[in-house]
Amino acid sequence: MSFLPLIALVALFLVGSYKFKGILGGFSHKSDGDSFSQQGVTVDYKAQTITIKSKKYPLSAIRGVRTESGPQRTRSRAFIKVDDMNKPVHEIVFYGDRLAEQFIERLAIAIEKAGGPHLTPY
């Protein structure tokens, strides 16, 4: 009896679950008294920092934010512009219409709440 088909099926399920979670990750955000977090971006209110995919910046390093939707409006992207010569713009991808816009609206509120700048799209 060969277990290869069963192993392949389990592996396919695990990979599919991981990708599905990544797609749905854009819908959920976490906000409590200490921080805001969504799609790999975290604003720490007390430390007055923003972490974008494990890269940490002071809130004063944020230069702007903007969004962009794909042609079929099935994918949207948020861009966070920071004072960093190595990576001045960070792209956050969302699979769904208006998800990037909703993210930027929440992010702007969180940044202001943490004492950062008032942001308007660039």
Image (cartoon, rainbow, N blue to C red):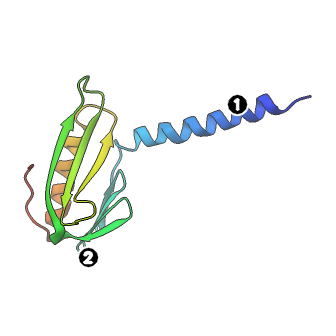
The reply to whether residue 92 is visible in this rendering is: yes
Where residue 3 sits: x, y (%)? 84, 33
* Residue that mark 2 sits on: 46
Q: Is residue 57 left or right of residue 11?
A: left
Quarter occupied by residue 102? top left
Give the residue at the far bottom of this rendering.
Answer: 47
Where residue 98 sits: x, y (%)? 22, 35
Up/down of 29 relative to 15, above or below: below
x 41%, y 39%: residue? 24
Quarter occupied by residue 88? bottom left
Secondary element at image label 2? loop
Query: Label 1 crowding class (10 Å Cα cut-off): few <14, some 14-19, many 20+?
Result: few
Up/down of 77 relative to 5, above or below: below
x 35%, y 50%: residue? 39
- Nearer-the-camera pick, 61 or 47: 61
> Can you say which quadrant of the picture contains the N terminus?
top right
The amino acid pointed to by label 2 is: Lys
| Numbered label tally | 2
Give the residue at the far right of this rendering.
Answer: 1
Q: Is residue 23 left or right of residue 63?
A: right
Quarter occupied by residue 22? top left
Closer to the chain start, of discs 1 and 2, is 1
The amino acid pointed to by label 1 is: Leu
The reply to whether residue 114 is visible in this rendering is: no
Secondary element at image label 1? helix
* Residue that mark 1 sits on: 9
